Amino acid sequence: IAGFTEMADAYNNVGVEYASGHGDYAEWLEREDPNEIINAGDIVSVKAGKVTKNLAGAEQIMVVSYRPMVLGNMPAEGQEYLGNKIAFKGQVPVKITGPVNSGDYIIADLAIPGFAKAIHPTKMTADLYTYYIGRSWVSNPEQGPKLVNTLVGSDQSAFIAIVEKAEAEISDIDLRVTVLEQQLEKIRAAKNPKAKKK
């Protein structure tokens, strides 16, 4: 009994648990232009490890963290003002225009720098995934700008969905090709019945 008790105590003390009201893991990234104004909730693009609200040529679309639970990659003391805390994983308030429903895909709004917009899962297209940020966890029917709690860096269903859609389209094309080949074979046979008898 004493052995099992010691083993249970040891198991319960393994590792470290962090508890916080903050919702994401972030890293400090330098701004492409040190003078560009970028705030929490803004949508940014990452280019060669630096961030900007200009999405042209983006290697990745991300969002500026509000208050990260864990913050990595901090610069030398006194250099913090040159960059921003960028959310890599977790729940983050994101600046959004227009209505949003829980479960909507959140993508960068190309018309309004720093903002995102909500897209219903059934309306997502391959080109929109280029600007994918995460999934909304709240609903808000208001048209104006708002902060929306968004899950970033953890949702793989967006990419699974596009692969499944592509596979379905390929299967449909294969079926159509098979039907066309069968129809062509019937046309050939009807035009040349002697060839069929041989």
Image (cartoon, rainbow, N blue to C red):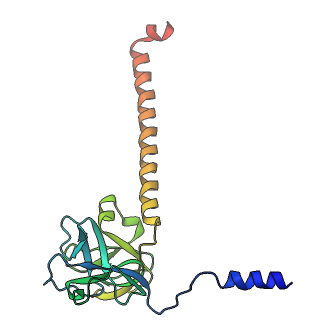
Q: Nearer the viewer, residue 160 or 117?
A: 160
Percent across and percent down for residue 179 are: 45, 33
Percent across and percent down for residue 5 are: 79, 85
Q: Quadrant of residue 189 in the image?
A: top left
Could you tell me how many numbered marks the image carries? 0
Q: In this view, does 193 lie to the left or right of 81?
A: right
Residue positioned 77% across, 84% down in the render? 6
Q: Relative to residue 127, is residue 82 depicted above or below?
A: below
Q: Tell me, yes or no, if residue 159 can be seen here.
A: yes
Q: Quadrant of residue 141 in the image?
A: bottom left
Q: In this view, does 61 lie to the left or right of 102?
A: left
Q: Relative to residue 165, is residue 42 depicted above or below?
A: below
Q: Nearer the viewer, residue 132 or 71?
A: 71
Percent across and percent down for residue 69 are: 43, 87
Q: Relative to residue 104, is residue 77 depicted above or below?
A: below
Percent across and percent down for residue 190 are: 42, 17
Residue positioned 45% across, 81% down in the render? 137
Q: Which of 197 and 155 is in front in this view?
A: 155
Q: Quadrant of residue 12 in the image?
A: bottom right
Quarter occupied by the N terminus: bottom right
Q: Tell me, yes or no, if residue 97 can be seen here.
A: no
Q: Residue furthest right?
A: 1
Residue positioned 46% across, 39% down in the render? 175
